Image: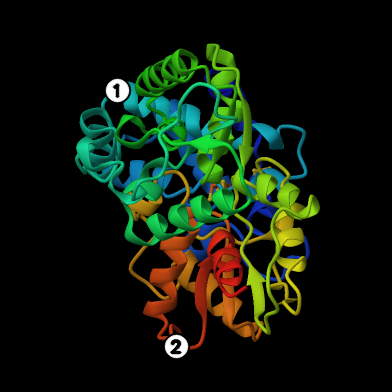
């Protein structure tokens, strides 16, 4: 694993600081630096702290661990660092976290995240027997179905994300797609567990999920969340979990092109939040936009920071639960909510349950909830299908 090499390479960062910015240097684009404004919370500062810890120049402390875990693994630094090692930066951070996990030296919030996934199969510590309660009679996957719809922990348990899951189910059913869900038998995908550095638990989840999928004869998986999409597509194959994995925006965009989904007219003015695990991690920028642009009358307006320069909502790497960046008007989700509002849009569209929960809360905290709706793309489509 690339993470294991980090100790011999991390000194190569010379703290120039380019990784803090978007391409045009117009603002701060590392969410943890934007939140705290101390260099220790920037990429370079964080890497130097890790290096000092490795060399024994500084002692471990809970504060040091929190600085390490305040990184949302958004990959803005990977985009902006001019050095050849740029693609490895997040692996280095994950590698240092993995060493802290092995030594049992992690922040209590992160320990609780691991305990919840280990004991309950989700980080929210909610009952396994309630996992499928959102589904309201949605068909359970059976051999012969074309797709397994994997909804993930937020889609299963979070009230807002459940609405997103139900909307996607409605749109897929309307388009005549052959699919089923796992209901109570679904388990955490492990993306956040990987990013938080608990490699033993991650391996356990990959093997358990892959075995279940294989027993059921699953070949194609469509995920609600970009986080699940990322790990099933990019991490599972190394452990024998080879499936065709799609994010739902890819499937819906294809259905629209084949005229299997038609929307009615709208006057909505919409801006779109690129999820890090869809955009920077997997280069999926066009499909969500093409879905929105296919809707008659819809006006898409971009935020100043978009696509590769998009500003993370702050929820990545488990922060939608551990919340190490919360508690301030400088929290990434609140910064992003204001940026979305400044576009003049009436709706902030997302394509990720984590973005949905983070930005919905942020819009409320900014007292913008009567001016800016936060909706997932599947919800926007469902509303317009219903209006037909
Ligand atoms: S990670 Fe790259 S851009 Fe950031 S401080 Fe280090 S060398 Fe500079
Ligand atoms: S991955 Fe994102 S949050 Fe982490 S150091 Fe890089 S820019 Fe900052």
Q: Name the secondary structure under disc 1.
A: loop
- Determine whether, in the image, residue 375 is placed left or right of residue 325: right
Q: In this view, does 202 lie above or below 168?
A: above
Q: Name the residue under label 1.
A: 103
Q: How would you rate the neighbour count of disc 1 (Cα within 10 Å): few for under 14, some for 14-19, many for 20 or more?
A: few
Task: Mark 1 vs mark 2: give the one in front.
Answer: 2
Q: Can residue 70 be seen in this view?
A: yes
Q: Which of 135 and 24 is in front in this view?
A: 135
Q: Which of 145 and 151 is in front in this view?
A: 145
Residue sitting at x 71%, y 73%: 304
x, y percent for residue 78: 68, 43
**Which quadrant is the C terminus positioned in?**
bottom right
x, y percent for residue 316: 48, 49
Q: Is residue 332 above or below residue 276?
A: below
Residue sitting at x 40%, y 49%: 155
Q: Is residue 36 visible?
A: no
Q: Which of 123 and 223 is in front in this view?
A: 223
Estimate the spatial distance between the alpha carbons at disc 1 and disc 2, rounded to whole Å: 48 Å
Residue sitting at x 59%, y 76%: 340
- Determine whether, in the image, residue 135 is placed left or right of residue 194: left
All told, the count of numbered labels is 2
The yes-or-no answer for disc 1 within 8 Å of ligand 2 is no
The label shown at residue 173 is none
Looking at marks 1 and 2 on the same chain, the residue that comes earlier in the sequence is marked by: 1
x, y percent for residue 368: 45, 85
Q: Name the residue under label 2.
A: 370
> Splitting the image into 4 quarters, where does residue 263 fall?
bottom right
Q: Name the secondary structure under disc 2.
A: loop
Q: Is residue 367 above or below residue 281?
A: below
């Amino acid at each position: 694993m690339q993470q294991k090499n980090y100790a011999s390479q991390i000194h190569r960062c010379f703290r120039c600081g380019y990784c803090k910015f978007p391409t045009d240097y117009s603002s701060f684009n590392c969410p943890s630096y934007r939140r705290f404004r101390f260099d220790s919370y920037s990429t370079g500062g964080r890497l130097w702290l890790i290096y000092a810890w490795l060399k024994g120049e500084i002692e471990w402390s809970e504060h040091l661990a929190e600085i390490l875990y305040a990184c949302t693994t958004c990959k803005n630094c990977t985009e902006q660092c001019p050095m050849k090692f740029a693609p490895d930066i997040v692996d280095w951070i994950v590698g240092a976290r993995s060493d802290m996990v092995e030594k049992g030296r992690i922040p209590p919030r992160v320990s609780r995240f691991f305990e919840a996934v280990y004991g309950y199969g989700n980080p929210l510590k909610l009952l396994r027997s309630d996992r499928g309660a959102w589904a309201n009679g949605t068909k359970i996957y059976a051999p012969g179905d074309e797709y397994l719809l994997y909804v993930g922990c937020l889609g299963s348990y979070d009230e807002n994300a459940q609405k997103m899951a139900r909307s996607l189910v409605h749109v897929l059913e309307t388009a005549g797609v052959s699919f089923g869900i796992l209901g109570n038998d679904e388990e955490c995908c492990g993306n956040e567990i990987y990013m938080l550095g608990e490699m033993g638990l991650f391996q356990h989840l990959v093997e358990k999920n892959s075995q279940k999928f294989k027993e059921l004869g699953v070949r194609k998986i469509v995920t609600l969340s970009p986080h699940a999409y990322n790990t099933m597509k990019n991490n599972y194959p190394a452990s024998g979990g080879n499936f065709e994995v799609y994010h739902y925006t890819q499937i819906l965009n294809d259905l629209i092109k084949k005229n299997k989904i038609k929307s009615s007219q709208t006057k909505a003015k919409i801006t779109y939040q690129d999820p890090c695990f869809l955009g920077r991690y997997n280069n999926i920028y066009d499909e969500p936009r093409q879905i929105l642009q296919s809707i008659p009358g819809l006006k898409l307006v971009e935020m100043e920071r978009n696509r590769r320069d998009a500003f993370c909502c702050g929820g990545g790497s488990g922060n939608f639960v551990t919340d190490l960046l919360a508690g301030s008007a400088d929290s990434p989700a609140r910064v992003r909510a204001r940026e979305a509002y400044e576009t003049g849009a009436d709706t902030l569209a997302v394509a990720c349950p984590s973005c949905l929960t983070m930005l919905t809360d942020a819009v409320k905290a900014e007292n913008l909830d009567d001016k800016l709706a936060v909706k997932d793309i599947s919800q926007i489509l469902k509303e317009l299908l219903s209006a037909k």
